[in-house]
């Protein structure tokens, strides 16, 4: 078949062209079509990536937070229109009292952010005033935004907001009595059979985990990202996953193993329009044309981390492309889409 010969060749050429380090994993309803690893998981030790190496996901794991919130709504612990002030016992002196869980999930809260991606360009700038090694829990992020003024009115517009997902994690912790990471481990990862996945500390990474690398192309040097991102991921991102595990998550989600059919539809509903073709649901991006959703996807980028994973409902196709560098997954995903789906890059 063309797919078994030509697609690997195209991916190989693109990977060589962009010096890709990571995994390319493609699966349809019946079988794994491609699983290929490139580059080093540990450059110093010359340890190669494998198809089941664990990678950081940055904001690509916000979807787990959204699923967890939906689970709590199903259990009657929360409602989507519950005001923030009614479900989190923390004082925010300047926050609008009308901010709801729905606003937090859809990046329409108008809240201040600890890392405003429309204003700040370099995530590492955050840690000039606050040592990154001191952000070990969700509450450690509060001083970065807790007493800042609102950026806008709730529901006014889409404005990507990391702090909103920190607050959702704190809500999950208060409502369950568990650490956010423990809840996701038991109620999402274990239920999906994602046994290679977790929220690991950067200074205690388990075996077969890729170290994140930051390249300085001008100086032709590199360094690890251990001092450039929080020590441990949380509700705004930072889970470590293997590519096969992410595929298991997509399958469990669309087979209604994590949420009821009705709640899954609520999660995947295009709640807010981002641009002409892209909408945002709860923790997930979607491409829509003529009111038809043809692609669901998550993505993330941090120093030493880039991640993209998509589900194409018409074809039943799953793609997972993690990397332990800051670029690559978008370019590789474009190659896959062009080959398997006949898309143009602009779509």
Image: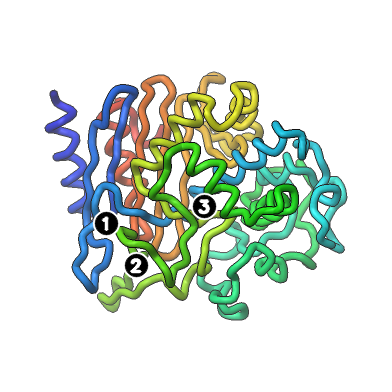
Q: Which mark is residue 213?
A: 2
Left or right, residue 110 beside residue 189: right
Q: Is residue 261 left or right of residue 203?
A: right
121 vs 98, left or right, is left
Residue sitting at x 84%, y 62%: 91
Residue at 66% across, 53% down = 178
Quadrant including the C terminus: top left
What is the secondary structure assignment of the residue under circle 1? Answer: loop
User: What is the x, y in percent for residue 332?
Assistant: 29, 44
Whole-percent x, y for residue 32 in the image:
26, 31
Query: Distance between the Cα atoms at labels 3 and 2?
Result: 17 Å
| Residue, disc 3 | 59
**Residue assigned mark 1:** 21
As helix, strand or loop, the secondary structure at mark 2 comes to strand
Spatial separation of the CA atoms under disc 2 and disc 1: 10 Å
SS at mark 3?
helix
Residue lying at 34% horizontally and 67% vertically, measured from the top left: 213
Q: Is residue 220 above or below residue 192?
A: below
Q: 259 or 285: nearer the eye?
A: 259
The 10 Å Cα crowd at callout 3, few under 14, some 14 to 19, many 20 or more, is many
Residue contact between numbered discs 2 and 1, judged by CB atoms under 8 Å: yes
């Amino acid at each position: 078949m063309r797919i078994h010969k030509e697609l690997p060749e195209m991916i190989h050429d693109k990977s060589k062209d962009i010096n890709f380090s990571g995994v390319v994993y493609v699966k349809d309803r019946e079988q794994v079509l491609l699983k290929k690893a490139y580059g080093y998981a540990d450059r110093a030790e010359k340890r190669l990536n494998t198809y089941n190496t664990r990678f950081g996901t940055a904001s690509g794991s916000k979807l787990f937070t959204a699923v967890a919130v939906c689970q709590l709504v199903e259990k009657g612990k929360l409602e989507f229109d519950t005001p923030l002030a009614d479900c989190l016992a923390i004082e925010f002196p300047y926050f609008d009292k009308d901010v709801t869980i729905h606003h937090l999930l859809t990046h329409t809260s108008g809240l201040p952010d600890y890392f405003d991606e429309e204003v700040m360009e370099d995530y590492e700038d955050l840690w000039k005033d606050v040592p990154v090694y001191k952000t070990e829990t969700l509450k450690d992020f509060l001083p970065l935004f807790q007493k800042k003024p609102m950026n806008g009115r709730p529901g006014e517009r889409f404005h990507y907001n990391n702090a909103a997902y920190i607050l959702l994690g704190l809500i999950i912790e208060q409502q369950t009595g568990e650490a956010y990471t423990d809840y996701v481990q038991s109620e999402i990862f274990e239920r999906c059979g994602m046994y290679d996945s977790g929220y690991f500390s950067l200074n205690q990474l388990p075996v077969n985990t890729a170290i994140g690398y930051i390249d300085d192309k001008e100086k032709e040097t590199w360094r690890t990202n251990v001092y450039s991102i929080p020590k441990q991921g949380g509700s705004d991102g930072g889970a470590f996953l293997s590519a096969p595990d992410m595929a298991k998550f997509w399958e469990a989600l669309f087979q209604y193993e994590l949420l009821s059919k009705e709640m899954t539809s609520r999660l995947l509903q295009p709640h807010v329009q981002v641009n002409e073709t892209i909408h945002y649901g709860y923790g997930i991006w979607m491409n829509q044309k003529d009111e038809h959703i043809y692609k669901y996807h998550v993505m993330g980028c941090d120093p030493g981390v880039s991640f993209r994973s998509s589900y194409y409902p018409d074809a039943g196709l799953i793609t997972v492309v993690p990397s332990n560098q800051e670029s690559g997954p978008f370019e590789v995903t474009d190659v896959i889409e062009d080959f398997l789906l006949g898309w143009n890059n602009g779509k």
